Amino acid sequence: MKTYLYKPLFASLIIAASSLAHAQVDISVGIELAPPELPVYDQPAIPGDGYLWTPGYWSWNPNENDYFWVPGTWVTAPYAGALWTPGYWGYVGNSYSWNRGYWGDHIGYYGGINYGHGYAGVGYQGGYWNHGSFNYNRTVNNVRNVHVTNVYTSNITNVQNSHVSFNGGRGGVQMSASKNEQIINSMPHNQATQRQSEHETQAHTLPDQRLSTNHGAPRVAATPEPGAYNAANIEHTRTERAAPRQVMQKPQAPAPQHENQARAPQAAHENQPQPHPQQQQNQQQPHPQQHENQPHPAQEQHQEQHQENHANGHGEEHKEK
């Protein structure tokens, strides 16, 4: 029997959700500096069966008054059927507060943040539990060259396409928790495992993970396991995230003429009017008759005769005078 990410929840399970915003807040101090955008990175290969992906996030260092990046990593589930709901930053009362993630039987609300790799803003599309084994969606999980028992392929739907890392406020994701998500978030659940906590603590001590040092592009964006910051297969921030224009300007193969006419200009000189291909050919290959603008021989002879007669006429006039 499958354990789906969204189970039907009946009205009898509804618990007062008014305390929801306070129950999950981990960092309640007011932070006026908005968290930066999420870096773009690849996912390390899964270490083996039983691991679940936990996306990276920005945490706050109150001693340094600085954000630092906690890399995404593969974590062994604390029990069969456990699913990870990521934490998220929320803008409330003119400041930003961190709502910590948790383990539970369902995926709850995480601010509509698109963390990638199956966490597209709502729910989790990276896999599901079935008879005590986790089934991995190869579309969003790096299960290549690794022996994983249960895999499948399914396209995902991005609910949120931006890299914004916080909910609410100016520039934040504008998405509220659904009724089901409110119920799930108020249910009993488990906090992060000890290895997850140690993973965050270690990131806190690494200068390269600080925003003031990496400027939004941390050196270690993801690790194969918690605390494996020096592993051979760590993932760095993808460079195309920092310079998307260079990617868009890669040279392309020439296209047929009718496609070039419909295509938007790709370079500055293409904005200037260009001659028709036939005119361009005529400019490059002069017509064999270089004297085509000169008069015809017959016309030339006629003009010479006319000039001679005209000169004779003027001569006679002078004689009469």
Image: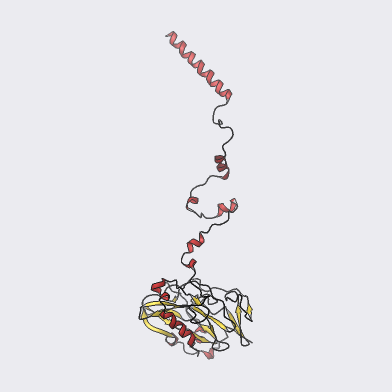
Q: Is residue 254 above or below residue 65?
A: above
At x 43%, y 11%, the residue is 318
Which quadrant is the C terminus positioned in?
A: top left
Q: Position of residue 234 (x, y in %)?
A: 51, 75
Q: Is residue 181 above or below residue 164?
A: below
Q: Is residue 103 above or below residue 251?
A: below
Q: Nearer the viewer, residue 145 or 169?
A: 145
Q: Position of residue 225 (x, y in %)?
A: 52, 81
At x 46%, y 14%, the residue is 314
> Could you tell me how many numbered marks the image carries?
0
At x 45%, y 11%, the residue is 317
Which quadrant is the N terminus positioned in?
A: bottom right
Residue lying farthest top? Answer: 320
Q: Nearer the viewer, residue 128 or 79?
A: 79
At x 42%, y 85%, the residue is 26
Q: Position of residue 202 (x, y in %)?
A: 44, 82
The answer to whether residue 222 is seen in the rendering is yes
Quarter-of-image position of residue 152: bottom right
Q: Nearer the viewer, residue 73 or 135?
A: 73
Q: Is residue 107 above or below residue 311?
A: below
Q: Position of residue 121 (x, y in %)?
A: 51, 76
The structure's colour scheme is: secondary structure
The answer to whether residue 192 is seen in the rendering is no
